[in-house]
């Protein structure tokens, strides 16, 4: 990576003196190598061979498009733009190609060469602060490939940006005891792409040593740290910090995935003995000694401890001599049974005054179209739209719905409509062509319209389409089943 050789009078390094300004790394990308240092009589600053004859700068291996920053505040005393991708020997931009020269006062100057064409290069005369963006890296001018030529000069006259003399910013056995860097560090690249990434320990203007413009994980892996514009920023990593390749930000690890069906909302487990939720991949489980309550559109909660009833009195009706009793909300509820009490199917019922053949237990009517029972002389009858067997109507009555209504769509007695009860709300829809019953436990359906072969209605042909209402009912039925099993 070479620039044209410009004939200058060589000045002994000892005569140049220390710069009045200290410089910071001119790129936020610290994961790079130095491809060539300044030539100190055939050696680089550490007496190695990573230099080439007559080289007056530090070649930093930046790929095309990396931001280039001011190493210290100053004034743009020269700029060039418009050079295309270059080649060794190109004279565009004086060999630097697209570049910026910053005058820092007291005769100190920095040059940033081989920038990309049209990358927002700073204007002539602009006053810029330390860390200000000057443009982006490229390979313009006399360049064999993308990189940044960073050159420090001393004893410069501002009106003549190429006056004075180039000097090595690194202090070393073969360059002298003076470092131009704010914090030089101990890193060293013996060749491009080999060795330590950067000899800098402070890479951003005004930032403390050991901090960088890119995010870096701390040693414990619990947070990542960076310094931008002199400000140290920290970000905690609850799930640990992941180290990425040099030149890229380290990242906080994402939380592990939650099991299917769990999120941050508390939900009752099957059986209602617990509630669970998952936050940041961690499943939390809480036992519910008295059951779990899952109200609609709200988080599940554990039920509080109910008031205590006598040990012999439970939530179901039980006989107690000529009465029956049960525990409701911690209080004993009693009902008198003047003509006796009997337990049928686990439930205590009063038996007096019932018609012959009708007892306290549910029994099917002779035509299996309904079921009935008698409690204290009062007969209760429920129609079974889908038939009765063993004293039970086909289908399951939804909690909160009136007897005789079901969660499945059920034909009305006259076949003119469908109805169901879902979440305590009765829904119905008219059947203009009558209603077709199906097997017990399945949705009944409105009869399909008769469509002549090839006739098209609503965009669907008779041979391949389906009536719109039928599709609606199928969708509703699918939704019901999905919700019941969620």
Image: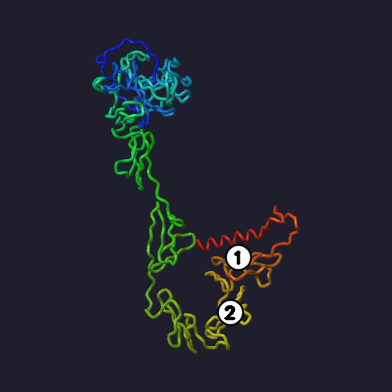
In this view of the protein, which residue sits in the foreground, 238 or 142? 142
Q: How many labels, in total?
A: 2
Which mark, by number, is residue 427?
1
Helix, strand or loop status at disc 1: strand
Where does residue 344 sit, x and y in percent of width and height? Answer: 49, 82
Location of residue 408 with respect to 68 vertically, above or below: below
Q: In which quarter of the image is residue 171?
A: top left
The residue lying at 54 percent from left, 65 percent from top is 423
21 and 255: which is toward the camera: 255
Q: Would you place residue 439 above or below residue 259 in this image?
A: below
| Image: 296 above or below 75 | below
The local secondary structure at tag 2 comes to: strand
**Residue 14 at least partly seen:** yes
Disc 1 from disc 2: Cα separation: 23 Å
- Residue visible at 46% across and 56% down? 260
Q: Quadrant of residue 265?
A: bottom left
Position of residue 266 relative to residue 67, above or below, is below
Reading the image, the residue beneath label 2 is 371
> Residue 79: where, in percent of width, then height?
42, 19
- Marks 1 and 2, the one that precedes in the sequence: 2
Q: Let me know if residue 205 appears in the view.
A: no
């Amino acid at each position: 990576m070479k620039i044209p050789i410009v004939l200058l009078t060589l000045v002994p390094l000892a005569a140049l003196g220390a710069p009045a300004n200290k410089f910071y790394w001119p790129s936020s990308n610290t994961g790079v190598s130095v491809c060539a240092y300044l030539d100190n009589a055939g050696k680089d600053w550490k007496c190695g061979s990573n230099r080439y004859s007559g080289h007056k700068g530090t070649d930093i291996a930046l790929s095309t498009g990396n931001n280039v920053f001011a190493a210290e505040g100053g004034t743009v005393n020269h700029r060039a733009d418009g050079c295309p991708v270059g080649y060794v020997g190109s004279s565009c931009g004086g060999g630097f190609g697209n570049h910026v020269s910053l005058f820092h006062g007291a005769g100190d100057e920095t040059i940033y060469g081989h920038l990309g064409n049209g990358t927002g290069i700073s204007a002539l005369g602009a006053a810029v602060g330390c860390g200000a963006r000057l443009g982006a890296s490229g390979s313009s001018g006399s360049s064999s490939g993308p990189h940044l030529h960073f050159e420090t000069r001393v004893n410069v006259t501002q009106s003549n940006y190429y006056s004075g003399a180039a000097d090595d910013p690194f202090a070393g056995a073969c360059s002298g005891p003076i470092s131009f860097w704010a914090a030089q560090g101990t890193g060293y690249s013996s060749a491009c792409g080999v060795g330590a990434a950067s000899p800098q320990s402070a890479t951003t203007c005004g930032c403390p040593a050991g901090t960088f413009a890119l995010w870096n994980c701390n040693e414990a892996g619990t947070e990542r740290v960076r310094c931008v514009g002199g400000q140290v920023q920290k970000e905690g990593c609850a799930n640990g910090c992941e180290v990425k390749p040099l030149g890229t930000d380290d990242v906080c690890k994402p939380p592990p995935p939650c099991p299917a069906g769990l999120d941050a909302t508390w939900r009752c487990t099957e059986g209602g003995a617990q509630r669970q939720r998952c936050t940041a991949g961690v499943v939390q489980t809480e036992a519910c000694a008295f059951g779990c309550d899952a109200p609609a559109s709200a988080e599940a909660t554990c039920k509080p401890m109910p008031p205590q009833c006598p040990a012999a009195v439970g939530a179901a009706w039980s006989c107690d001599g000529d009465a029956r009793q049960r525990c409701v909300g911690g209080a004993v509820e009693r009902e008198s049974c003047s003509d006796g009490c009997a337990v049928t199917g686990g439930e205590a019922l009063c038996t007096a005054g019932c018609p012959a053949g009708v007892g306290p237990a549910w029994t099917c009517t002779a035509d299996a179209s309904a079921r009935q029972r008698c409690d204290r002389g009062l007969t209760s009858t429920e129609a079974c739209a889908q038939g009765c067997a063993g004293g039970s109507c086909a289908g399951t009555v939804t909690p909160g719905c009136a007897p005789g209504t079901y969660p499945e769509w059920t034909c009305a007695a006259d076949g003119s409509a469908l109805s169901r009860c879902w979440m305590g709300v009765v829904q119905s829809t008219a059947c203009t062509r009558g209603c077709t019953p199906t097997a017990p436990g399945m949705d009944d359906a409105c009869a399909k319209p008769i469509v002549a072969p090839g006739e098209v209605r609503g965009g669907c042909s008779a041979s391949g389409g389906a009536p719109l209402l039928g599709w609606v009912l199928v969708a509703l039925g699918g939704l019901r089943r999905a919700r019941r099993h969620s």
